[in-house]
Image (cartoon, helix red, strand yellow):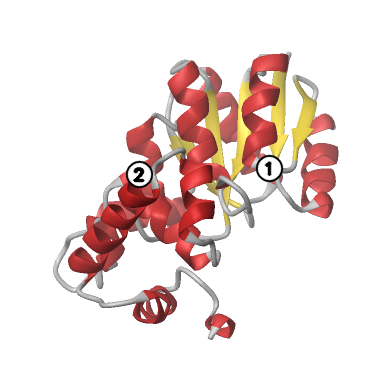
């Protein structure tokens, strides 16, 4: 039996995926979590075979949760689940050790294929992510400028776009205010922007957030 920990901050999504997966003969959802913080604790308590991790969540978020889980145990099999299939996040997660990335719009058979693939120690990427990674850097690919950011800089970007203060970011990432500001101005330099307003506009332009934010 493949034991799955399901992590998503939306109850309706959690319930829907849990119901679908529990209908599969060799898969059982043994626990759910609604935040990255809960996911880290649940992995320790339940030792699931596979973690299905929503990436876009409040608090520390899915990326930081993946980093903390894999830092504790690099053998944990994680499947990232997100509505955003482009930008720097898929690449950053794969570098961290996440084995799979699937879209929230994926059919249940693709999620099952991803689960079985990672159980065999194989990577599995949904077609949209695979195509985006394959074409990154090619002429005319309109590569996102966010792809040049480091993992930690990408985390800071995510928290800025969530409206977090420097103090809140320091608590979430367990870094000093000074270090957060260092990452902030370093990413400004890499993206050739001057402030958070320009960061939001750039994120909207490349499809990382919804234009209703401004």
Q: Is residue 183 left or right of residue 212?
A: left
- Viewer-nearest residue: 142 or 148: 148
Q: Can see residue 19? A: yes
User: On the picture, is 130 further left or further right than 77?
Assistant: left
Residue 169's spot in the image, x, y percent?
48, 52
Which residue is situated farthest in the left direction here? 139
In this rendering, would 93 be left or right of 134? right
The crowd level at tag 1 (other Cα within 10 Å; few <14, some 14-19, many 20+) is many
Secondary structure at numbered mark 1 = loop
**Residue 19 image offset from top left, x and y in percent:** 85, 39
At a point 70% along the width and 33% down the height, the residue shown is 38
User: Does residue 122 appear left or right of residue 163 in this picture?
Assistant: left
- The residue under label 1 is 35
Residue 152, x across and y down, in percent: 34, 46
Residue 186 falls in which quadrant of the image?
bottom left
Residue 73 placement (x, y as % from top left): 48, 16
Reading the image, the residue beneath label 2 is 92
Visible in this render: residue 85? no
Which of 103/208 is in front?
A: 208
Q: CA distance from mark 1 to mark 2?
A: 20 Å
Q: Earlier in the sequence, mark 1 or mark 2?
A: 1
Residue depicted at x 53% and y 44%: 172
Q: Secondary structure at mark 2?
A: helix
Kindly identify the residue that appears in the image at 73 percent across and 13 percent down.
1
């Amino acid at each position: 039996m493949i034991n799955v920990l399901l992590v998503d901050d939306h109850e309706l999504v959690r319930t829907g995926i849990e119901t679908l997966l529990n209908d599969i003969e060799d898969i059982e959802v043994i626990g759910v979590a609604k935040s990255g913080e809960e996911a880290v604790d649940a992995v320790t308590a339940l030792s699931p075979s596979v973690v299905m991790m929503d990436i876009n969540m409040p608090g520390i978020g899915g990326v930081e949760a993946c980093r903390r889980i894999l830092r504790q145990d690099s053998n944990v099999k994680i499947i990232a689940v997100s509505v955003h299939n482009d930008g720097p996040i898929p690449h950053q997660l794969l570098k961290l050790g996440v084995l799979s990335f699937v879209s929230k719009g994926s059919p249940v058979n693709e999620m099952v294929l991803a689960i079985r693939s990672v159980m065999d120690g194989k990577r599995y990427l949904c077609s949209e992510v695979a195509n985006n990674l394959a074409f990154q850097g090619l002429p005319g690919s309109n590569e996102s400028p966010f792809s040049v950011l480091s993992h930690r800089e990408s985390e800071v970007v995510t928290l800025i776009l969530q409206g977090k203060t420097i103090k809140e970011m320091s608590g979430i990432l367990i870094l000093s205010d000074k270090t957060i500001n260092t990452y902030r101005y370093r990413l400004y330099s890499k993206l050739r922007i001057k402030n958070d307003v320009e960061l939001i506009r750039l994120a909207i332009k490349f499809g990382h957030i919804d234009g209703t934010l401004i």
